[in-house]
Image: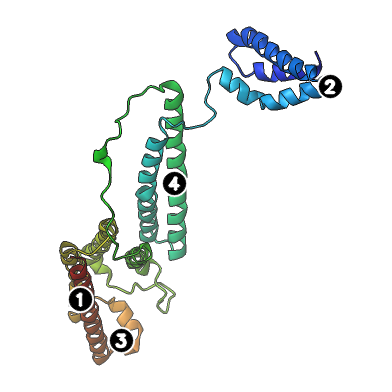
Amino acid sequence: MSSLTDRYLAATLRAVPTPRREEIATELRGSIEDMIEGRTGAGQDAATAEREVLNELGNPDRLAARYADRRLQLIGPTYYLHWQRLLRLLLSFVPALVGTLVGLARAAAGDGPTTAITSGFTTAFDVAIQIAFWVTLVFAIVERVDPSLKLPAWTVDQLPEVPAKRDMTLTDIAASVALLLFTAAFLPWQHFWSWVKDTDGERIPLLDPVLWRSWLPVLIAVLLAGVAFELVRYRVGRWTWPLVTVKAALDLAFSVPVVWLLVDDRLLNPALVERFAWLQDEGNRQSITVIAIITAVVVLVWDLIDSGVKARRAG
């Protein structure tokens, strides 16, 4: 017997359980000899026959896995769909949620917008990697430790409804969420990293710092509620009258306080007004207030009409 067969046997046996090695070695050697004998009986050269037989048997590690009844996959078919479903669910919102919270926290701590956004994205990526690793590890361990674990069987009750035609795209939702998050991050950013400086080089917040004791946290909460609303809206897939009502309430909850603070001359930081001569003119401030009110009313009415029309078409 040439060294090729011996090498093949050694490569196969090193990957099978020790108690079965002698049995498998005898069986496998006999099979190889019979296959070679069959080919040489047909007139083939012994060395060529041996090489072709071993090539036909294939990778010794794969053959050893068959002898040892060992699966050559990380997650087998028993748990694959459960692993996939859980992984998709967690990755669909956890990284984005954690990344957003970290980004807002960095902005509130005084970091610049670039640093806050970068931290948010980096954290979201790290969280996604951690989720994928640990979920896969748990399922891989379960696959090998308790392959007979009883999981809920599939039934027809789990069939999803036929998806209705969507009135909105993922791009639209993503753009709305990005705008809301940008606005929420801008509020703490303008306080710590305003581009306006006084004569001593100190940064001047754009909005009155006193508002952090009252309205600014409320406005941030409304913006974050708007993010949650956009996710729900995408989940529903179309405009409904309840969604129109919630949208109108959120728009009013943000626009009314902002306009009221402008009219009451409490929105802008007094130090900012003193810094610019044109802002000290009451007429200019009134013009800004009128423009802001008109803009808020136009946006609010447009949102109501647009969402109402879409809800009527969908209903």
Residue located beneath label 3 in the image: 279
Residue under numbered circle 1: 305
Residue on which disc 2 sits: 45
**Residue 140 x, y percent position in the rendering:** 46, 30
1 vs 3, front mark: 1
Secondary structure of residue under mark 3: helix
**Distance of label 2 from label 3 (alpha carbons):** 100 Å
Distance, label 1 to label 3, CA atoms, is: 35 Å
Q: Earlier in the sequence, mark 4 or mark 1?
A: 4
Query: Front-most of 185 and 175?
Result: 175
What SS does tag 2 mark?
A: loop
Cα–Cα span, label 2 and label 1: 86 Å
78 left or right, relative to 279: right
Mark 4 vs mark 2, CA separation in Å = 57 Å
**What amino acid is labelled 4 in the image?**
Ala
Q: Earlier in the sequence, mark 3 or mark 4?
A: 4
